Amino acid sequence: MIDFKNCKVYIALAAIIFTVFLFIAIVTDGGIGGGDIKLLTALSLIFGISMLEIIIFALLIASIISIYLIIVRKQKYNSSIALGPYICIGVFVSLIDSFL
């Protein structure tokens, strides 16, 4: 998985992901936690460009489950969810996708 030839790309991607999600956290007044930002940054150093796929899977799964919880009235519209478990699920889905 780790390609040492593209080390500069991995570091640049980690910096971009950190900056983007920190900006989102500041703009949304804590909509994304600091732990989520650190987790995404660390994972981008490991997975490189496939990190975009992981982020898409994580946000898609989190959105689907949140919408379901709002529909069945287990969660309010303005309540927050932990994004860390969905990021981990996104990693697993991406790994399974890469092996198949």
Image (cartoon, helix red, strand yellow):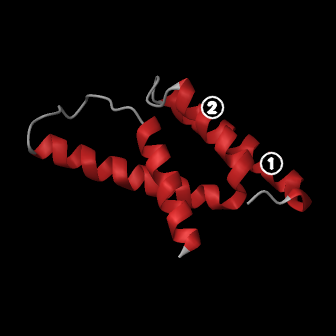
The label number, if any, that marks residue 12 in the structure image: 1
Residue at x-position 72% and y-position 56%: 48
> What type is the residue that disc 1 sits on?
Ala
Q: Position of residue 83 (x, y in %)?
A: 43, 37
Q: Nearer the viewer, mark 2 or mark 1?
A: 2
Confirm whether residue 23 shows in the render: no
- Whether 44 is drawn above or below 1: the answer is above
Mark 2 burial class by Cα count in 10 Å: few <14, some 14-19, many 20+? some
Q: Which residue is mark 2?
A: 38
Relative horizontal placement of residue 94, taking residue 73 as reference (left or right): right
Q: Position of residue 42 (x, y in %)?
A: 68, 39
In the image as oriented, which residue stretches furthest toward the bottom?
100
Establish if 64 lies above or below 26.
Answer: below
Residue pictured at 64% horizontal, 61% vertical: 50
Residue type, mark 2 in image: Lys
Q: Using the numbered discs, state the Cα–Cα distance from disc 2 to disc 1 in whole angstroms.
A: 15 Å
